[in-house]
Amino acid sequence: MPITVLLVDDEPLVRAGLRAILEAQPDIEVMGEAADGAAVVPMVRQLRPDVVAMDVRMPLLDGIEATRAVLRTVQPPPKIMVVTTFENDEYVYDALRAGADGFLLKRAAPAEIVQAVRTVAAGDSLLFPAVLRAIAAGRGNERARAAMEKAALTAREAEVLRQMARGLSNAEIAATLLLGSETVKTHVSAVLAKLGARDRTQAVIAAYESGFVTPG
Amino acid sequence: MPITVLLVDDEPLVRAGLRAILEAQPDIEVMGEAADGAAVVPMVRQLRPDVVAMDVRMPLLDGIEATRAVLRTVQPPPKIMVVTTFENDEYVYDALRAGADGFLLKRAAPAEIVQAVRTVAAGDSLLFPAVLRAIAAGRGNERARAAMEKAALTAREAEVLRQMARGLSNAEIAATLLLGSETVKTHVSAVLAKLGARDRTQAVIAAYESGFVTPG
DNA sequence: GACCGGCTCCCCCACGCGGGGGAGGCCGCC
DNA sequence: GGCGGCCTCCCCCGCGTGGGGGAGCCGGTC
């Protein structure tokens, strides 16, 4: 069955764009749209979407309050993916702290948007936002570590990430772990996917930010 | 004038290899060789090399003691580059703590060996070892920060490194700093060279390890 | 038995990355 | 004035990286 999505954004243009991009995917179905936060809870109750793509800055009820409202009143809660224009939007942290499962930049490429929906829907929950959430929660290293665990890296993947954080290349990791370089590539790809990282550098950053590895 | 180098290693094979690699460079001159640490001080006094390529594990007087002896008795002291077989050689940390300016793996490619000599000779002092030294000195963040400053990144390079540590690609850094992507590449290359990093991932690791950026 | 997840390895392919050059403009220092 | 450092941008080129597939093996689960 397809991933069902509810779009929440005050700009029709954005909703249309998201709809066009997501509907082009055979495994994703846009169930409905809401123009403000106040309409979200009733629609979620009625439609029961897997994922809510939620704008942060909205009239009436913003994304943060809407996220809280949904999580407080709907069981089981849908996955909530925060959508924002600015990378360092303070509100995003608030939304993540309120319990959102991921975040997405509006200027992201269509493929990234699609992938973000799939990832959030799978419950894997992008680590980067999770880390951000931990940070937003007050630099709590505790929650960050939990977030990393939530990413549920396998033993092998964790080991590979550790080597990545030592600055090793795929070939070097293969040598140290006595693996084929193709195998390492597979693990690295899995790590990148689970951590919501685009490349190994971002993965290492996530490793540091989450406390998976520590300086010194 | 060429960079003058003194080779110190108990294995003739290693000395011959280093000599062959370094002598092939027009700007590097091997002034002499020593087979153990005890012979180092007199030779340094007599030859006044710019750089001493010093093996760590040696009979009579090991590389750590020899490094201390040289730095204590010769003014101005030569640059001391520790040479080792194993990546995680405990002795290397001791040597770096004793004041060595860089370190080199024996299995490094000839081009890397040459570059390491040039870098150490230039007084730029590879950051990675400097960071390692700071770590070896007792996880002192103080010294690590000093090490990073010693790498003497320009204002622009530091800014670019900061963006790298945010996980941005060259194109993204170009966009945020309002630069051409070619310019960013230039700065990135400069950062990699000064930090002794092979790629951006290693540079970001160095940034974290040195306290240039901190988790959270 | 069938199933699934983890681990291993393989293919192809596009692209960003990093190294190697060079070049011009700007500013401060001697 | 000359010089060097910094910043800016350009070229070419090789290669590692990461994404897209697929496949076999094993061990635990139902």
Image: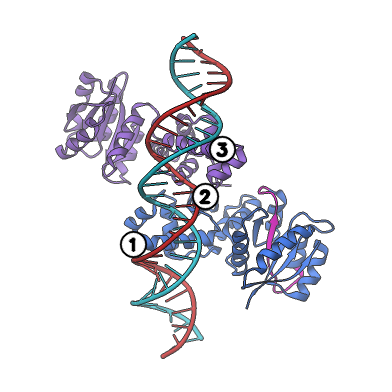
Chain colours: A blue, B purple, C red, D cyan
Give the vertical position of D19 relative to B119 (above or below): below
Q: Are marks 2 and 1 on the same chain?
A: yes
Direction from residue A118 to residue B95 in the image, left or right: left
Cα separation, mark 2 vs mark 3, equals 25 Å
- Secondary-structure class at tag 2: helix
| Chain for disc number 1 | A
Q: Earlier in the sequence, mark 2 or mark 1?
A: 1
Residue at 61% over, 49% down: A139
Give the vertical position of B194 relative to A153 (above or below): above
Could you tell me if residue B105 is visible in this image?
A: yes
Is the residue under label 1 in contact with that under label 2 (CB below 8 Å)?
Answer: no
- Secondary-structure class at tag 3: loop
Within 10 Å of the Cα at label 1, are there few (<14), some (14-19), or many (20+) other Cα atoms? few
Measured as percent of width and height from the top left, residue B132 is found at 40, 40
Direction from residue B127 to residue B17 in the image, left or right: left
Q: Residue furthest left?
A: B12
Of badges 2 and 3, nearer the viewer stands 3
Of badges 3 and 1, nearer the viewer stands 3
Disc ID at residue B180: 3
Reading the image, the residue beneath label 1 is A179
Q: Are marks 2 and 3 on the same chain?
A: no
What amino acid is labelled 3 in the image?
Gly
Of A143 and B191, nearer the camera is B191
Reading the image, the residue beneath label 2 is A205
